[in-house]
Amino acid sequence: MIIDHRTYYTQAARTGDFLELWERMALPYQMKYLENFVGMFTCDVGDLSQVLHMWQYEDQGDRERRRDAMYQDPGWLEYVNELKESGLMVRMENKILRPVPFSPLR
Protein backbone atom coordinates (compact mmCIF):
# COMPACT_ATOMS: atom_id res chain seq x y z
CA MET A 1 0.00 0.00 0.00
CA ILE A 2 1.20 3.51 -0.83
CA ILE A 3 -0.20 6.99 -0.26
CA ASP A 4 0.07 9.62 -2.98
CA HIS A 5 0.55 12.87 -1.03
CA ARG A 6 0.22 15.98 -3.16
CA THR A 7 0.61 19.61 -2.12
CA TYR A 8 -0.70 22.44 -4.26
CA TYR A 9 0.45 26.00 -3.62
CA THR A 10 -2.20 28.51 -4.67
CA GLN A 11 -2.09 32.21 -5.42
CA ALA A 12 -2.34 34.24 -2.20
CA ALA A 13 -5.94 34.53 -0.96
CA ARG A 14 -7.15 32.23 -3.80
CA THR A 15 -7.25 28.91 -1.92
CA GLY A 16 -11.06 29.03 -1.75
CA ASP A 17 -11.26 29.52 -5.53
CA PHE A 18 -8.90 26.59 -6.07
CA LEU A 19 -10.99 24.36 -3.78
CA GLU A 20 -14.23 25.35 -5.53
CA LEU A 21 -12.79 24.50 -8.94
CA TRP A 22 -11.30 21.22 -7.67
CA GLU A 23 -14.54 20.08 -6.00
CA ARG A 24 -16.68 21.02 -9.00
CA MET A 25 -14.49 19.76 -11.85
CA ALA A 26 -11.78 17.39 -10.54
CA LEU A 27 -13.30 15.46 -7.65
CA PRO A 28 -15.94 13.59 -9.70
CA TYR A 29 -13.26 12.19 -12.04
CA GLN A 30 -10.82 11.42 -9.27
CA MET A 31 -13.49 9.54 -7.33
CA LYS A 32 -14.38 7.60 -10.48
CA TYR A 33 -10.83 6.59 -11.41
CA LEU A 34 -8.70 6.83 -8.28
CA GLU A 35 -11.38 5.66 -5.81
CA ASN A 36 -9.44 5.53 -2.51
CA PHE A 37 -9.64 9.15 -1.33
CA VAL A 38 -7.89 9.53 2.03
CA GLY A 39 -8.58 13.24 2.44
CA MET A 40 -7.96 16.84 1.48
CA PHE A 41 -6.61 19.44 3.86
CA THR A 42 -5.74 23.11 4.09
CA CYS A 43 -3.18 24.66 6.42
CA ASP A 44 -4.47 26.51 9.45
CA VAL A 45 -1.04 27.70 10.62
CA GLY A 46 1.97 28.49 8.44
CA ASP A 47 1.71 28.85 4.67
CA LEU A 48 -2.05 29.30 4.22
CA SER A 49 -1.84 28.92 0.45
CA GLN A 50 -1.26 25.15 0.69
CA VAL A 51 -3.84 22.50 -0.19
CA LEU A 52 -2.91 18.86 0.43
CA HIS A 53 -4.67 15.74 -0.69
CA MET A 54 -3.95 12.05 -0.33
CA TRP A 55 -5.01 8.96 -2.28
CA GLN A 56 -4.34 5.35 -1.34
CA TYR A 57 -3.17 2.75 -3.89
CA GLU A 58 -2.14 -0.88 -3.77
CA ASP A 59 1.25 -0.04 -5.27
CA GLN A 60 2.90 2.22 -7.84
CA GLY A 61 1.52 0.11 -10.71
CA ASP A 62 -2.04 0.53 -9.40
CA ARG A 63 -1.49 4.30 -9.18
CA GLU A 64 -0.14 4.51 -12.72
CA ARG A 65 -3.00 2.42 -14.20
CA ARG A 66 -5.66 4.51 -12.48
CA ARG A 67 -4.09 7.86 -13.38
CA ASP A 68 -3.50 6.78 -16.99
CA ALA A 69 -7.19 5.85 -17.31
CA MET A 70 -8.23 9.21 -15.84
CA TYR A 71 -6.03 11.08 -18.32
CA GLN A 72 -7.90 9.36 -21.17
CA ASP A 73 -11.17 10.97 -20.07
CA PRO A 74 -11.96 14.24 -21.91
CA GLY A 75 -13.73 15.57 -18.81
CA TRP A 76 -10.55 15.27 -16.75
CA LEU A 77 -8.55 17.02 -19.48
CA GLU A 78 -11.12 19.83 -19.43
CA TYR A 79 -10.39 20.32 -15.71
CA VAL A 80 -6.62 20.29 -16.33
CA ASN A 81 -7.00 22.99 -18.98
CA GLU A 82 -9.31 25.07 -16.77
CA LEU A 83 -6.80 24.88 -13.91
CA LYS A 84 -3.97 25.99 -16.21
CA GLU A 85 -6.00 28.90 -17.56
CA SER A 86 -7.18 30.00 -14.11
CA GLY A 87 -3.70 30.83 -12.85
CA LEU A 88 -4.78 29.64 -9.39
CA MET A 89 -1.90 27.22 -8.87
CA VAL A 90 1.63 28.49 -8.28
CA ARG A 91 3.32 25.10 -8.00
CA MET A 92 2.74 21.47 -7.05
CA GLU A 93 4.76 18.97 -5.04
CA ASN A 94 4.16 15.22 -4.99
CA LYS A 95 5.37 12.47 -2.64
CA ILE A 96 4.74 8.74 -2.54
CA LEU A 97 4.52 7.56 1.07
CA ARG A 98 4.98 3.98 2.28
CA PRO A 99 3.66 2.92 5.70
CA VAL A 100 6.00 1.55 8.33
CA PRO A 101 5.17 -1.92 9.76
CA PHE A 102 3.31 -0.52 12.79
CA SER A 103 1.26 2.09 10.89
CA PRO A 104 -2.54 1.82 11.29
CA LEU A 105 -2.85 2.33 7.52
CA ARG A 106 -1.29 -0.74 5.88
Image (spheres, rainbow, N blue to C red):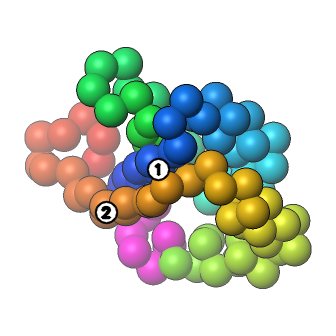
Q: Quadrant of residue 47?
A: top left
Decide which of tag 2 and tag 1 comes sooner along the chain: 1
> Residue 6 magenta-drawn?
no
Q: Check residue 16 in the rendering and tell me which mark sits there, or answer none.
A: none
Q: Position of residue 33 (x, y in %)?
A: 70, 62
Residue 27 in percent (x, y) is at 72, 46
Magenta range is: 56-63
**Residue at 44% of width from left, 36% of height from top?**
49
Q: Residue type at mark 2: give it.
A: Ile
Give the distance between the C-alpha atoms of the residues marked 2 and 1, in whole angstroms.
15 Å
Q: Is residue 57 magenta?
A: yes
> Which residue does the image show at 31% across and 63% down from the upper left?
96
Q: Residues within 10 Å of mark 1 (few under 14, many from 20)?
A: many
* Marker disc for residue 8: 1
**Residue 89: image location, x then y, percent:** 56, 53
Between marks 2 and 1 in the image, the one whose residue lies nearer the viewer: 1
Specify whether residue 35 is in view. Answer: no
Instruction: Please give left or right for residue 98 compared with residue 39 in the image.
Output: left
